[in-house]
Image: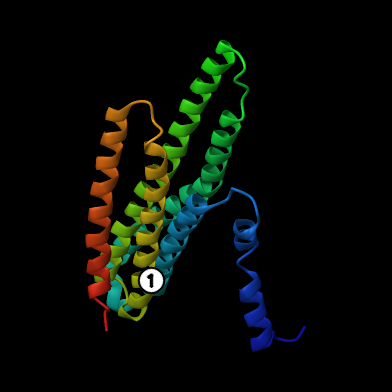
Amino acid sequence: MSEPTPADRKLDLSNSVGDFAERVAAGTPAPGGGSVAAYCGVLAASLGQMMCNITIGKPKYAEVEPRLKAIRSDLERLSARLRELIAEDAASFEAVLRAYRLPKDTDAQKSERAAQIAVALRGAIDVPFETAEQSFEVLVLLRELADVGSANALSDVAVGAGLALAAIRGASYNVGVNLSSLSDPDSADELRKQMNALIDRTEAMAGEVEAKIKI
């Protein structure tokens, strides 16, 4: 069998992204922004793993190799969870739609519908909130890699930090859009405060990574 040509390799790489983008582009409510946010988190973790794999084994970085291996393991764990959240976000949105479509002709139906909507809305908040939290953990590790990893992959880590920032911001939009529908305003206010605090920490940390490579 002949060696693949550069054109073959280019086509293979182009096709390797799968059909996720097409599923997002389709005329269906889900997957949407929440799933895309989680996918950005996956890509951010992947770039961190890339940095680890490029650095591990190089004599210059032998002293930090144990830490790099630990970071790589943590990123693999985070990536696996974020992959699950891609599907869970779509499912949570579909659960909200199903709840709103429940019949409301009788008082009993109205009561059941309201209860199901409340449960579904909480799920539609909890899933993107976790996406933001998991993506922030990725960003923390990327920030560390910017200091201890190979300088040759610093730009990749910076891209990862940007993707983590996009993941967290995107997830926050999905949290926020559902908070106003919660029946408990105190709980909504607390979640809003937590998310805003996380966004502030995210922007500061992503800025630190960017400052290391900014032209």
Task: Say if residue 140 shows up in the picture.
Answer: yes
Q: Position of residue 106 (x, y in %)?
A: 60, 13
Question: Residue type at mark 1?
Answer: Val
Q: Position of residue 97 (x, y in %)?
A: 58, 36
Quadrant holding the N terminus: bottom right
Q: Nearer the viewer, residue 102 or 149?
A: 102
From this view, report whether residue 188 is shown above or below residue 57.
above
The residue beneath circle 1 is: 159
Q: Is residue 87 left or right of residue 155?
A: right
Q: Residue at x 37, y 37 (%)?
A: 179
Q: Is residue 164 left or right of residue 105?
A: left
Q: Secondary structure at mark 1?
A: helix
Q: Is residue 8 left or right of residue 42?
A: right
Q: Is residue 18 left or right of residue 181?
A: right
- Report the residue that reaches farthest toward the front: 105
Q: Nearer the viewer, residue 161 or 116?
A: 116
